Image (cartoon, rainbow, N blue to C red):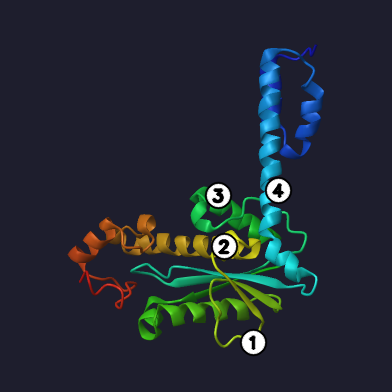
Amino acid sequence: MSEKKISDIQKEYKATDISVLPDFIQEYINDGRPGVSKIISQAQKRMEKLRIEKERIEKLKEYEYKYWDKYDYVAGIDEVGRGPLAGPVVTACVVLPKDCDILYINDSKKLSAAKREELYEEIMAKAISVSIGVVSEARIDEINILQATYEAMRHAISDSKVQPQLLLNDAVTIPQVDIPQVPIIKGDAKSISIGAASIIAKVTRDRMMVEYDNIYPEYHFASNKGYGSAEHIAALKVNGPCPIHRRSFIGNFV
């Protein structure tokens, strides 16, 4: 029987990195005390969750595996901000390495804000290239949101640190681009590269809208991110539009 107190083993468990959890389990699995058995059960559940997540991520690389044999630089492209009443449309182009080990990537809408921020930092640190395209609300009004989105995507592609050899796009085919493209419906939930791009674009745009909230606090951009929430629409009716409102989007409200 272990000489250690159960409370000490619990502290050790909480401090144990998941990479060495198998060793922790091995050390205490035959302890026999119910309290320790409970800790071991928690550790085993954590290991099982990790195994399931690794399997999910491998499946999320299905499109990448299809093309990585032929291409070194496969880029994921996604956009955020086609629907809001205010602010820019933001796109990201992300090229991940073939040995990418980032877990928990998913469609950015399925992740909490805290998880997106955490993954943003990891993607920025581990990706071969991350580039952003931003097109303003004025340009959206000038050429329409679809063309503005394409323009932002072209900006992101041209700013890539490496020349992408293939583009995996979330649903669209981008005009005026010579690189081969594969449009994937709901691609941010089916491709790790597009999922990574959706996280980068979402965090980038959200941070911009928080900054705009400091300038135009009456519209509550930090919480609504420019989307047409009831609070935002009410503020628009009372205050009228501010410089970052899309005039072509707000005709029903002002």
Question: Label 1 is placed on what type of residue?
Answer: Asp
Residue 185 percent coordinates (x, y) = 55, 68
| Sequence-first tag of 3 and 1 | 3
User: Would you place residue 228 above or below residue 56 in this image?
Assistant: below
SS at badge 4 = helix
Amino acid residing under circle 2: Asp
Whether residue 33 is situated above or below residue 155 in the rendered picture: above
Residue closer to the observer: 177 or 138: 177
Q: Quick check: 49 above or below 138?
A: above
- Specify whether 64 is left or right of 117: right
Circle on res. 54: 4
| Cα distance in 3D space between marks 3 and 1 | 35 Å
Dot in front, 4 or 3: 4
Which residue corresponds to mark 3?
A: 115
Q: Which residue is mark 2?
A: 188
How far apart, in angstroms, are the residues tagged by discs 1 and 4? Answer: 34 Å
Residue receiving disc 1: 178
Amino acid type at mark 4:
Lys
Give the quarter of the image for residue 195.
bottom right
Could you tell which of marks 1 and 2 lies nearer the N-terminus? 1
Query: Which kind of residue does numbered mark 3 sit on?
Result: Lys
Tag 2 or tag 3, which sits nearer the N-term?
A: 3
**Quadrant of the frame with the N terminus:** top right
